[in-house]
Image: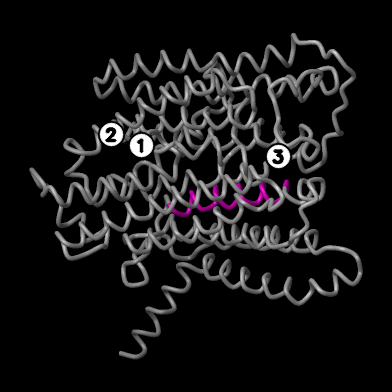
Amino acid sequence: MNKLNSLLFQVDVVSLLPEVFLALSFLVLLIYGSFQVIEAVNRDTYLAPSVARLTLVTLFLSLLLVFNSPILNGVVWNATFIVDGAGTSVKCIVLLSIFLCCLLAEEYLFLARIRPYEIFVFFLGVALSLCLLISSYDLLSIYLSIEFLSLIFYTLAAWKRDSGFSAEAGLKYFILGSLASLFFLFGSSLIYLVTGTTNLGTLSLLFDNLSSASTLSSLGFLFVISALLFKLGAAPYHMWVADVYEGAPTIITLLFASVPKFAIFVAMLRLIFISSWSLFPVVWESLFFSCGLLSLFFGCLGGLGEIKLKRVLAYSGIGHIGFLCLGTGCGSLMGVQSIFFYLFFYTLTSLYMWTYLLHLYPSKKNWLSIVDSVGLVQSNPILGIMTCLMLFSLAGIPPFGGFFSKMLVFASLVDGYFYSLALFAVFTSALSAFYYLRLIKILYFEKPKTWVFFCALSKSNAFVLCSTSFFVLFFMFSPNIFYLFAYKLGLFFFI
């Protein structure tokens, strides 16, 4: 019996070896910084460069551990976590995204005069919490992973202590995020009251083939999913998005906008398609279509009157979450495929646009206006044309990845006979293209009234801009790879 328990423990550890490695690295890096900070102060230097390089190495090794995991499928740690192909693939995408964020952070923090090294330790904490969230197979493990991630995000949002905007962003995010945590706990308690369990696999057996579910269980799942929709910034839970994005440091906003959505959607799809599929016609279809339409409406109209670049991209993100909610509401394999396909290209485009913002006066101004791009085309024509094409992709103009992402969502809606929703999505997409085209107009047709100077593009910024734009702009030459990848990910939620 002892040998069996020992063997099971080894299997559990090996299955979550990347998470164990990230947790140990998180502690080691924190201890290393604590011991070295006094020496760094005495030498009139700071630790951020060395800690940044250690963080990059740690993330790279974690990516290798995920990619070479010997356990491909299974439920581990007393059915609290699950290992499958979808989780492994999404972990690789999340770790790569955080790697790129960390690559950009060192130069930005130097120019913005943010000296504390702990921000890179928090990057490891974000990677750990997201990997745990992706593998979570229990309501308690989902909650703990979300809370670990939220505590780090609250701290990062208020990182600039001398900025009133940053303090406001952190406080607003903390108060509203606490309310979302309350929703999640209340919903979980209702589910446990009705079923006596919080395990997603057991819930799937209890709710399988039910013609109708109890009001308390439906209400519990509704509260849980609402909390996750708040973390995504979907309307009507979007009140915090624009203010937090504007107040947080730009590198932190890049992290907020680009990284966590993939992981949260995986957890949400497990809850919907595995644990509570029988509730789909009653609860999920109405909820996600309502949130999708509201997100498209607020994302479209909210960005039309904005002049601050951060707020424009924040409302753009709300609109894109609307498309993802519509894909979820379809309740079909094509709908889930469209979610992952859309998330992949949205993550790449979001990384590009926020890196572009990092390049524009990273430390000289508290906020960036849309007119701060005037003269960029004359200064750097290649960056100007790449940014113009990426804005076309965001607007959904063919033949770039953004167009095919939206087209797959439209196809999912039409396949489910939701014609009116598809027409509304097309209308709002065309209307929201205005503020993307306005940026292109400023880039190419506005002339600077005074002499403007743009900093040289750094190597890290250039690498991220080129690598992300390559997949989006040249998607048309090999589209089947991305379609099959999204289809394979979607299958894991229907087997």
Q: Which mark is residue 332?
A: 2
Q: Which stretch appears magenta?
A: 87-104
The x and y percentages for residue 144 are 41, 63
The x and y percentages for residue 206 are 14, 57
Q: Which residue matches tag 1?
A: 336
The x and y percentages for residue 16 are 47, 67
- Give whichever of 87, 353 is nearer the camera: 353
Residue furthest out toward the front: 164
Question: What's under tag 3, amino acid-wise?
Answer: Val
Give the left or right position of residue 181, taking residue 331 as reference. Answer: right
Query: Measuring 34% from the left and 43% from the top, which residue is drawn there?
Result: 491
Q: Which residue matches tag 3?
A: 464
Which quadrant holds residue 52? Answer: bottom right
Could you tell me if the residues under marks 2 and 1 are in contact, i.e. CB atoms within 8 Å?
yes
| Colouring convention used in this rendered image of the protein | one colour
Regarding residue 490, the answer to whether it shows in the image is: yes
Question: What's under tag 2, amino acid-wise?
Answer: Ser
Tell me which label, 3 or 1, sits earlier in the chain.
Answer: 1
Is 196 in the magenta?
Answer: no
Q: Is residue 344 above or below residue 217?
A: above
